[in-house]
Amino acid sequence: MCKKMLEHLGRPSNALLLRRLPHNEYKRVASDCAIVARIQDLDSVLDCEVLIPEIV
């Protein structure tokens, strides 16, 4: 991964709360507050597989 992308992943970002459905589908769970996520260990990102969920 390029350095610029790793720096971006280290910053807090808005996230969606998802529930897994059968057949590798996901459904967004409603939330009345903002969900903020940040990767704490950037080294672990280099060894992971990127998945793009289908939100229904």
Image (cartoon, rainbow, N blue to C red):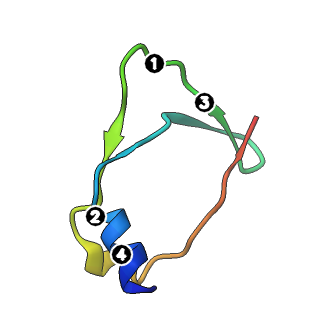
Q: Where is residue 52, by image quadrant?
A: bottom right
Tag 3: Cα neighbours inside 10 Å, few (<14), some, or many (≥20)?
Answer: few
Q: Which residue carries the number 1 mark?
A: 31
Q: Which residue carries the number 2 mark?
A: 10
Q: Distance of mark 2 from mark 1, alpha carbons?
A: 24 Å
Q: Which residue carries the number 4 mark?
A: 6
Tag 1: Cα neighbours inside 10 Å, few (<14), some, or many (≥20)?
Answer: few
Q: Earlier in the sequence, mark 4 or mark 1?
A: 4
Q: Are marks 2 and 3 in contact (CB under 8 Å)?
A: no
Type of amino acid under label 1: Ser
Q: Distance of mark 4 from mark 1, alpha carbons?
A: 28 Å
Q: Distance of mark 2 from mark 3, alpha carbons?
A: 24 Å
For image coordinates 31% across by 77% down, the residue present is 44
Q: Distance of mark 3 from mark 4, alpha carbons?
A: 26 Å
Q: Distance of mark 1 from mark 3, alpha carbons?
A: 9 Å
Kindly state the secondary structure of the residue where label 3 is placed. strand
